[in-house]
Amino acid sequence: MAEEIRAEIVGYVIEVVAAEGQAVRRGDHVVVVESMKMEIPTVVEDPGTVTSLHAAVGDFVNEGDLIAVIE
């Protein structure tokens, strides 16, 4: 089953840690979002492979925006 990684807060993507095709484990970071001078990493809940990324450095994201899909 696919896991959708969504932004937890409004802000700007300051780092993309994972790449499409990369294997990830529970607790790995996919991207880091900066909001109000705080850095908030998005975290993988279930192990799998990043099948698609929907965010790049500099992108503005709203809470709930799709960032990546893990299969």
Image (cartoon, grey):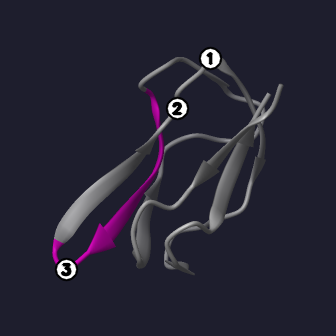
In the rendered structure, does residue 40 fall within the stretch colored magenta?
no
Could you tell me how many numbered marks the image carries? 3
> Mark 2: few, some, or many residues within 10 Å (few <14, many ≥20)?
many
Compared across the picture, whether 40 is left or right of 58 comes to left
**Which mark identifies residue 36?**
3
Q: Earlier in the sequence, mark 2 or mark 3?
A: 3
Circle 3 sits in a helix, a strand or a loop, which is it? loop
Q: CA distance from mark 3 to mark 1?
A: 30 Å
The residue where tag 2 is placed is 44
Residue positioned 39% across, 68% down in the render: 9
Q: Is residue 49 left or right of residue 34?
A: right
Image coords of residue 68 (percent x, y): 68, 50
Task: Tell me if 70 is positioned left or right of 41 in this view.
Answer: right
The reply to whether dot 1 and dot 2 touch (C-beta < 8 Å) is: yes
Residues at marks 1 and 2, CA–CA distance in whole angstroms? 7 Å
In the rendered view, does 53 fall on the left or right side of 62? Answer: right
Of 14 and 28, the residue lying toward us: 28
As helix, strand or loop, the secondary structure at mark 1 comes to loop
| Quadrant of image for the C terminus | top right
